[in-house]
Image (tube, rainbow, N blue to C red):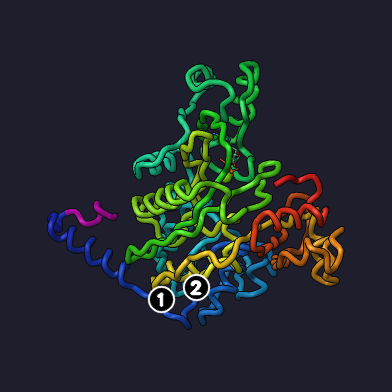
Amino acid sequence: MNQTSHTGNGALDKGEIHGSEQSKRLEKVIPPGSTIGVLGGGQLGRMMTLAGTNLGYRFVTLDPTPSSPCGQVAEQIVAGYDDQEAAKKLAERSDVITYEFENVDAGVAALLEELSHVPQGSRLLYTTQHRLREKRAVEAAGAAVAPYAEIGSEQELREAVARLGIPSVLKTATGGYDGKGQWVIRSEAEIGPAYAELSKAGTELVLEQFIPFVKELSVIAARSPRGEIRTFPVAENIHVDNILHASIVPARIDQEVQREAERLASRIAESMEAVGLLAVEMFLTGDGRIYVNELAPRPHNSGHYTMEACTTSQFEQHVRAVCNLPLGEAKLLTPVVMVNVLGEHVEAVTEAVATGRWGEVEAGSTALANVVPKVHLYGKAGSAAKRKMGHVNVLCSDVQDAVDFIQQTTIWRNQLI
Ligand SMILES: Nc1ncnc2c1ncn2[C@@H]1O[C@H](COP(=O)(O)OP(=O)(O)O)[C@@H](O)[C@H]1O
Ligand SMILES: [Mg+2]
């Protein structure tokens, strides 16, 4: 850090400056009553605010959409994410700053680090914003990723496809989400079109071997500046059209695999010296192997189940971690299935909140008697198909009851779990 600006001080001095800065960062506790600044005003910031408000924190968010989901429960600075003046204002009003998405503009991240206290640092963002850097960090922590190749030209893609096999997955190194910025190459004829399409983004590309997984899993780890680490129970994730549809907890996998998945997440968080939450997405293969797919340095959709089902929610844990409070216990209180409410589901779910009638499920039926659906809606002004509008945590004593309930509502038509 700033090595060059200290030239002439001698190695010992540099070490001391670095050491004291680091220990200040390790010791600094942000107590309740302080103000937490959140870059990004979406649902993750909103739920972070709701959890942190219970602990007595105040929140201010920066987001371009007036009355954003987070802005409805926190103060809001209305401005673009790359607006440096607005970022300065956020820094002035906050005792500590965090973010709810990882594509934070590098200039803004650096400015905030200089002007304010950003315990997560910019290195974690720098690594997780780029698939190749992220894969190297995961490998350095001793976890496996799908065999991959960096792609700089169509010729390199041809060679890499020959090596990694068909199918394989071409992805942009930056900016992808919900399956955007990727192409599953299923025949040699697709190599040209896939390269032409994805290289339009102008970012580096990466080719990954296709992993024939039997399940997708995720584990959310939390780490505080003082080095305490806790992991949440493994979630089994079901995607529909590349968007998370449901998370099932406990995951329907061996205890042994659960322990291994949690151990990997914790090792990655430790090796990267992450602060705050680190969500780790994984593939599980039929022979019990785990490959890490990608990381997110923030609360994650697959951790929403923790809100009612764990002793501490992922949002409270994130606040605890960035404020350097002792982390909360993260035990599962009840089996649960989280199901996402997208634009196409929101009307029926709103109706269920208002009437207690869940689609086709009859009031008083066994399907309803076996579960407790807890609804979270994000207060977004405009609804559109595929847009995340809320989620429902279906608490149950057996996850199959929750799966049956979700299917019987018919709200999530044709979306199998
Ligand atoms: N190497 C792979 N092998 C098999 N399936 C993959 C692979 N990479 C991605 N997928 C599928 O595509 C989904 C989205 O990919 P991911 O890399 O997680 O991107 P996003 O940023 O869109 O979430 C994954 O959840 C998984 O279902
Ligand atoms: Mg993903």
Above or below, 113 against 124 in this view is: below
**Image quarter for residue 145?**
top left
Residue 146 image point, x, y percent: 47, 33
Residue 130 image point, x, y percent: 48, 42
Badge 2 element: strand
Give the CA distance from mark 2 to mark 1: 9 Å
**Magenta span has 76?**
no
Image side of residue 304 versus residue 19, left or right: right
Residue 111 image point, x, y percent: 43, 61
Name the residue: 12% across, 58% down.
12
Residue 316 seen by the camera: yes
Q: Nearer the viewer, residue 210 or 249?
A: 249
The amino acid type of the residue labelled 1 equals Ile
Q: Callout 2: few (<14), some (14-19), or many (20+) C-alpha neighbours within 10 Å?
A: many
Query: Image quadrant of ligand 1?
Result: top right
Above or below, 327 against 10 in this view is: below
The amino acid type of the residue labelled 2 equals Ile
**Image quarter for residue 166?**
top right
Q: Could you tell which of marks 2 and 1 lies nearer the N-terminus? A: 1
Image side of residue 200 versus residue 85, left or right: right
Quarter of the image with the N terminus in it: bottom left
Tell me whether circle 2 and circle 1 mark residues in contact (CB < 8 Å): yes
Name the residue: 39% across, 39% down.
136
Name the residue: 85% across, 68% down.
363
Q: Nearer the viewer, residue 204 or 362?
A: 362
- Tag 2 residue: 36
Residue 181 image point, x, y percent: 61, 37
- Tag 1 residue: 30
Badge 1 element: loop
Name the residue: 53% across, 18% down.
158
Q: Which residues are magenta?
A: 1-7
